[in-house]
């Protein structure tokens, strides 16, 4: 699993400060999370193939999180896309995007599916054989969700050192990965645990932006491998965080601590702060494993 930060700043885009957008690489999927202005330019910079994006998750309908969406959808059309595209976001997103497409007489030549969200409790919104995605209800000025991406338990791993000692038919390798015992052609029975290793532990990633300090999300994101949590303000502006329903770096760190997260990435920085190291200084007293997001930066999970 790999997280690619395309933009991690709040409100208005600047020359070197792009608004929120991320690409999560997980189990052969490329999931786009939020789509602020300039997202498709950032996708170009990161050399991410547009055709591999089939699911887009929009947290809420503030411009710095979705104003790049209609442009990206239109670009997909110009590139001759034929694959289906699924967009998950708050109720109203279908109306906004289809109105823009209608007035521009620029309907897509591929199937565009909207999955509108209204629930106030965490719910499953995507699942396949490899992973699932759930909402994380957040507390912001408008209806907002974060997203929890969870890998499912994978297949058992072949212990190469052990299996090389036996003449195993090719088709039995898959049986071993499925956890089955096998019988060789010479009638030797192989116990699965003798020649395989446990599957790798499934990874979990939580995206939480935008939100005021909100401990109710802790049970949902408990023990995630990586938590991205907004940190719009520093402590000096905690009153603004409360007023605008955003969080401070220290508050984000407290959430990570309560959730027993393995790592925390801070983002959604206000442009009023020039020295981003202050966010680390205010977060680390509460949670040590902290990184700062940066446009173009990637994190292995």
Image (tube, rainbow, N blue to C red):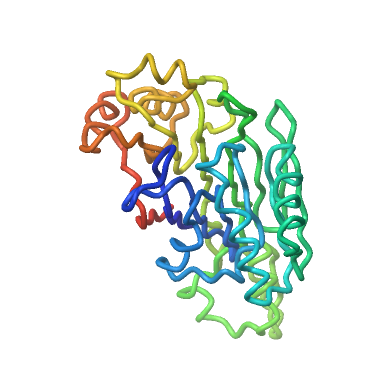
Q: Is residue 8 above or below residue 245?
A: below
Left or right of 241, for residue 195: right
Q: Residue 176's x, y, as percent? A: 65, 69
Q: How many marks?
A: 0
* Quadrant of res 79: bottom right
Q: Is residue 54 above or below residue 265?
A: below
In the image shown, does 196 or 84 lie closer to the viewer?
A: 84
Residue drawn at 30 percent across, 20 percent down: 235
Q: Residue 233's x, y, as percent? A: 35, 27
Q: Is residue 82 above or below residue 19?
A: below
* Quadrant of res 258: top left
In the image shown, does 111 or 38 lie closer to the viewer?
A: 38
Residue drawn at 32 percent across, 37 percent down: 271
Q: Residue 52's x, y, as percent? A: 60, 69
Left or right of 280, for residue 28: right
Q: Is residue 112 above or below residue 182?
A: above
Left or right of 122, for residue 8: left
Left or right of 241, for residue 152: right
Residue drawn at 68 percent across, 70 percent down: 77
In the image shown, does 51 or 274 lie closer to the viewer?
A: 274
Residue drawn at 62 percent across, 62 percent down: 155
Q: Residue 124's x, y, as percent? A: 72, 41
In the image shown, does 257 or 45 lie closer to the viewer?
A: 45
């Amino acid at each position: 699993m790999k997280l690619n930060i395309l933009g991690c700043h709040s409100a208005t885009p600047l020359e070197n400060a792009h608004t929120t957008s991320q690409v999560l690489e997980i189990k052969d999927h490329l999931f786009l999370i939020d789509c602020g202005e300039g997202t498709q330019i950032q996708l170009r910079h990161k050399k991410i193939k547009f055709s591999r994006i089939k699911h887009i998750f929009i947290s809420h309908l503030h411009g710095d999180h979705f104003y790049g969406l209609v442009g990206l959808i239109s670009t997909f059309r110009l590139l001759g896309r034929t694959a289906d595209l699924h967009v998950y976001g708050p109720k109203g997103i279908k109306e906004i995007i289809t109105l823009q497409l209608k007035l521009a007489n620029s309907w897509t030549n591929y199937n565009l599916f909207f999955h509108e969200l209204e629930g106030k409790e965490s719910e499953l919104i995507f699942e396949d054989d490899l992973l699932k995605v759930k909402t994380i209800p957040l507390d912001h000025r408008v209806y907002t969700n974060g997203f929890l991406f969870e890998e499912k338990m994978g297949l058992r791993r072949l212990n190469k050192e052990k299996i090389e000692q036996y003449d195993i038919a090719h088709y039995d390798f898959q049986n071993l990965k499925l956890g089955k015992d096998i019988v060789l052609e010479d009638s030797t029975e192989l116990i699965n645990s003798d020649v395989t290793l446990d599957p790798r532990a499934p990874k979990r990633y939580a995206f939480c932006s935008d939100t005021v300090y909100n401990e109710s999300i802790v049970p949902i994101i408990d023990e995630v491998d990586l938590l991205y949590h907004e940190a719009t303000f520093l402590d000096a502006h905690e009153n603004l965080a409360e007023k605008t329903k955003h969080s401070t770096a220290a508050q984000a760190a407290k959430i990570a601590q309560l959730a027993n997260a393995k790592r925390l990435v801070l983002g959604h920085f206000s442009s009023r702060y020039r020295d981003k190291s202050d966010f680390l200084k205010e977060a680390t007293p509460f949670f040590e494993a902290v990184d700062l997001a940066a446009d173009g930066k990637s994190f292995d999970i």
